[in-house]
Amino acid sequence: MEEPQPAPEATEDSPPPTGIQKTLRALYVAFDIISKSLQWINDHMGNFNVYLFIKYLLASIAFYFVACASFGWVTLGIIYLVISHERKGKRDLRGALALADESTLKNIFAASMHEMPAWVTFPDMERVEWLNKIIRQLWPYAGQYVKDLCKYSIEPSMRTALEEYKLNGFQFEKIILGDTPPRFSGVKVYDDTSRHEIIMDMDFAYAGDCKFEVSVSKFKMGIKDLQISGRLRIVMKPLVRQIPLVGGLQVFFLNNPDVDFNLIGLADVFDMPGLSDILRSIVTEQIGHMMVLPNRYPIQLVEDIDVVELKCPAPAGVIRLNVIEAQNLMKKDIGIMGTGKSDPYCILRLGAQKFQTKTINNTVNPKWDFFCEALANVIRRQRISIECWDYDYSPLKSYENDDYLGRANLDVQEIWKNGEVDMWVPLSEAKSGRIHIRATWLDLSDSADSLQLQLEEIRALQVSTKNPLHSAVLMVWVDSAKKLNPSHKQIPDPFVRLYVGNEKGETAVRQRTNDPVFEEGFTFLVRNPRTQELKLEVIDQKTNQIQGKVELDLNVFLKERKLEVIGEDYSLSGASGGLSTLKLNITLRILKTALKTDDGDGGPQEKGEGTEPLAEVASVEEVMSSAATPLTQMFPSATSSEASSIRQRTTPANNAGMHGLGRIQLTVKYGPRNNLIIVVHQIENLPKEEDGELPDPYVKLYLLPDRSKDSKRKTDVIKDDCNPKYDERFEYPIPPNELTQRTLEVNVINKKGLLFLQRSPKMGQVRLDCGLLDSSKMTQWYDLAPAADDDEE
């Protein structure tokens, strides 16, 4: 340790030191010794907090003695200490933020979230203004690509669609992109995917000054002010070891984008209710046919890759939907003295796939018992939309002529997690009404042994419905054809048409070739592969003559290894010369219903061998501190006996809560669509009435501070039960910046008596602060407390 240098002594010429100067010199020597000693301790013992404390203490003493000469020095010293400490803290925070990822940032600010303004959130999507600047610079050079896309991809599809309405000869006359490029408002890159792919979601929006002039049936018209918005997904796969390191891109919308435009020229006559909706629906359908799941827009970047996986990947599974019934729908057909009902039907959409129930006339409580099955190509970020409409007759094919009754949405990932969901869902954008939906996830199996079990399940379901259900998925890859014979000594323009039952698919036309390369994939749902067949026809577009055909019995593929045949050349029957062949990949997958349980990382696991049984829960504390049981975590099944038994085993018995009023099990979470989701599962150990009579309980919800009719949600009344089970789901649309200002009030009410003799006292209440929701504990038991207010229903 270095010795401190003594203070300079006074010379004969200098005046003798005063008392304050002697004191300051002594303090200088003492402070220097202590400072260097503590510096040595700090260097050898790391970050020693005592050093900082003593440093500030000695500095304060020094400033105190200086104050004998001037009190202003104390103020300056305090200001210096405060500023230096704040600057050091900010430097440390900037360093931490520079190295931290999103989860670390959330941990840093979690402790002080309640002190932050309500508008401070952690968005799921990252801003990419740098990308928008690049697109703005490149936009003038994109004109030729867009023109080719319109002429060779969009124009043929639009021509075919308009021919159904007797509008022939559609073609683009002029294409002007304008100066306004599309924008991406946010980007999310997933980090929990396969190491051979990159998945990126982008919020896409285009509201430009483009202009398209077209001609239909010799009439010229135009479209301007085109607007498209939606969530775009880009899948980069496979990753390769050569530049550009990405073998190909799959670009598609997860759900149907919002599309709007204005009509110009002669098309102004179409800009009226009904006819303009036809044009808008056709444009939306063509976008869906081109790049809304299950359709994708593939871009191949490297030659030597598996184009089958790029252009036609296998679906993740199949969702079997059962729209059972609805209750208390709005009355749109108003009759005399305010009476009247509706003629309701439902439209279901998953990406570009659309299904429609039958119409039930003159009722607000329809029972459809409608079944349909949709291909699920991705799991995350996709939803099933169910819209309810009141049918009104119109000669024009437009849903806009019907009255809107509300909508409901199901998250595909929740169905995948739980295996099956069965619930009543309230209709949003409606004054009243709810709909009963059951959704089942079906895996794809490469074992023929699964077929018989699936056929038996279908037979059991067909007791109550006449709609056809399916037991398998057939994937057909049409690779190429060889040695097609020319029609009338002319080289054909061939394409392939495929049939499976009533389903049909067509490849694009290849111009003037006897050896066309198609490289297109098709996916069909199959009712029973033991009795159905696949039929393919190669047709010349110019003459509409069949160049040859192939008929294959699907029962043959049940005997193949992994139920597939890859790269097989099939001879075309009916072709002159007998040398024509069609190269195909054919894969059959059997649908398999599996009860899903959570394997710990958020993914499903089949219940069976290798699955640990659920343990008995021994205490209330374990239930309150644990996450929800996977079968009832988000959308519990109201009919599955096995799920019910699991839930009963994990529910502590004989517990009436802290106040002796019983307990309620709730799932509360904030959803990805800016909505608060509440599932009321069940109540246990409600007290009996004073005369020993059993209560008739129901649950009423309010999202405070709003106690209006719009904020109220209610379950059904369960008669004479102290342990009622509801499993009913409710939603509140709420922006994320308002969560910290809202409180969810849950009331349990006993609805006893008839008409004017009815009494509805509150049996208990729970209040939850929406700003403190814990995503790791969405499903919990809550003790019912005495009601905070004395008002009765």
Image (cartoon, grey):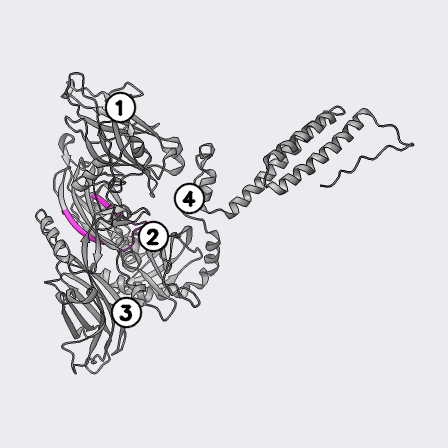
Quadrant of the rendered structure where residue 553 is? bottom left
Q: Residues within 10 Å of mark 1 (few under 14, many from 20)?
A: many
Pointer 2 with pointer 3, Cβ within 8 A: no
Pointer 3 local density, CA inside 10 Å: few below 14, some 14–19, many at least 20: some
**In this orientation, which residue lies closer to the viewer: 628 or 473?**
628
Mark 3 or mark 1: whose residue is earlier in sequence: 3
Label 2 sits on residue: 262
- Alpha carbon of mark 3 to alpha carbon of mark 1: how far? 64 Å
Q: Under tag 3, what secondary structure? A: strand
Q: Amino acid at mark 3?
A: Glu
Q: Amino acid at mark 1?
A: Gly
Question: Which of pointers 4 and 1 lies earlier in the amino acid sequence?
Answer: 4
Q: Are marks 4 and 3 in contact (CB under 8 Å)?
A: no
Is tag 2's residue or tag 3's residue first in the polypeptide sequence? 2
* Residue extending furthest toward the right: 13
Residue 136 shows up from this direction: yes
Q: Quadrant of residue 780?
A: top left
Tell me which label, 4 or 2, sits earlier in the chain. 4
- Specify the amino acid type for callout 2: Asn
**Residue interval drawn in magenta:** 370-388
* Real-space Cα separation, disc 4 to disc 3, in angstroms: 40 Å
Mark closer to the observer (4, 2): 4
Q: Amino acid at mark 4?
A: Pro
491 sits left or right of 149 in the view? left
Pointer 1 residue: 764
Pointer 4 residue: 123
